[in-house]
Image (cartoon, grey):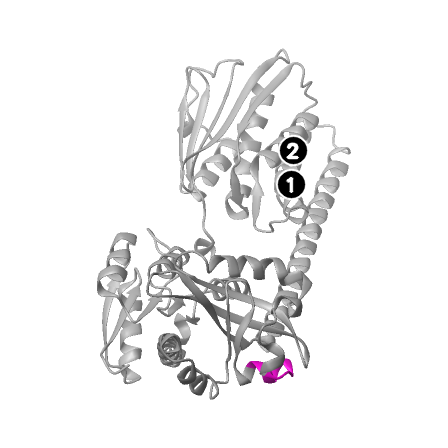
Amino acid sequence: MEEIIRILILEDVPLDAELIVRDLKREGFEFESHLVERKEDYIREVDEWQPHIILADHSLPQFDGVSALNIAQEKSPYTPFIFVSGKIGEEFAVEMLKKGATDYVLKHNLSKLGYAVQRALKELQERLEKEKAEKALLQSEEKYRLMVENQTDMVVKFDPEGQILFASPSFCEVLGRNEDMIVSSSLMPLVHQEDQKKTLRALDKLNNPPYVSFLEHRLLTMNGWRWISWANKALLDDEGDLEAFVGVGRDITERKLAEDRIMRSLKEKELLLREVHHRVKNNLQIVSTLLSLQSSEIDDERMQALYRESQNRITSISLIHENLYQSDDLTNIHFENYVKSLIDDLFHSFGVDPEKIKINIQIKDIIMGMETAIPCGLIINEMISNTLKHAFPYGEGNIDLKLSEKEQDKYVLKIKDDGKPFPDDFEIGNTNTLGIKLIQSLVMQLNGKLTMNKENKEFLIEFDELKYKERI
């Protein structure tokens, strides 16, 4: 590009943005940059400033890079989009590349940013040149042939019925056939059976605005099945009616093989992680069993109660790992199922008759990360344990447990019972029992707030979902 490059930077840390700008200047780029961090500012810059390239962090306080990628693809699909982030996992990177991201660069390795930007701008220039080529196709088929004969990418022109009208020499070479054998035939018989449905869907998209589609499928070539990536565009006549379609293809078999290797590696890591959760759960159960055996040799009822409380705390953590290795999601917990299992174990531990002491659990569609689920589960364990020990001297009563999402990543936990009233001098701040101290510590760990309504015996805890970055 001969004009000064317009670079839009989506970043909420000014120092990181300054490092990006400094690195690009050191690489000799002549550019102008705009820095944004909010969605509305980002959309305005994309619409009005029309950047040549977008550099985006993948996680911001009020916005995120994935949403930014979707907006860019909708408003300016040809604009290169590069993730520049502190940490991106392999699985996330592969997924974003599949969704249309141009590249990704880690912040601790900004030396690669210049190369990534240079390559992205070069590919953009090549893409723009191809679109000039499509306009030339409408003017002169002969000029089009002269251009594509020197292209290494495969070029195919076909009509709305799917019949091939033109095939470039490179495409003929890949198929191992001459142009006369290909023209007037359909490409579909050469498409792998498993890829035919998505191929038809991609072709159907060409009949509606914006008249473009992208496709990756397997094609039977002279060298067997090969993965081909297609960028397809509809050609309209002067009246705006569909005239034909043009597809530009590239062999991406080696890239797909590399992706497969990455996915197999991720699958192996997933299996290993499941095994870790399974073994942690088993080891915690062994510890619980040892405590049970030890307590059976003690006659002191107070000591037996302490052992039982320790077993219940261990069980609450063990259930987290059991839920994780049995779940399709190895990082998040379906919290309602977890709490119900936890309550069942507590009732069994205290010898509670569920027909006499009833608990009403209200938790709907709440998914929590392990970092949040463990302290929250321990809080519930302590509170329900205290209720079962002290609130129902006659072995009858009701408990209400409600967990709701106040707003995104912010929760409210309410626990109340209709049992024996609190002593007149009972105050949370003045209570030094291990259970209350543990609850206060766990609430603090969740950046939460604990309040109590003494009259109706209701505990209320407001807390935040702990994010992965908080445990780095």
Query: In the rendered structure, are the residues bearing label 2 and label 1 in contact, judged by CB atoms less than 8 Å apart?
Result: yes
Asked if residue 257 lies left or right of residue 438, the reply is: right
According to the picture, the residue beneath numbered tag 2 turns out to be 341
According to the picture, the residue beneath numbered tag 1 turns out to be 319
Q: Quadrant of residue 428?
A: top left
- From the image, give the main secondary structure of the stretch colored magenta: helix
Magenta stretch: give its range.
171-178
Vertical relation: 91 (above or below) 222: above
> In percent of the image, x 66 and y 37: which residue is there?
311
Vertical relation: 239 (above or below) 154: above
> In percent of the image, x 24 and y 70: which residue is there?
33
Asked if residue 203 lies left or right of residue 288, the reply is: left
Q: x, y percentage for residue 243?
A: 43, 65
Answer whether residue 119 is visible to the viewer in this image. Answer: yes
Q: x, y percentage for residue 25?
A: 26, 81
Q: Nearer the viewer, residue 126 or 234?
A: 234
Q: Nearer the viewer, residue 185 or 196?
A: 185
Label 2 neighbour load within 10 Å: few <14, some 14-19, many 20+ = some
Q: Quadrant of residue 121?
A: bottom left
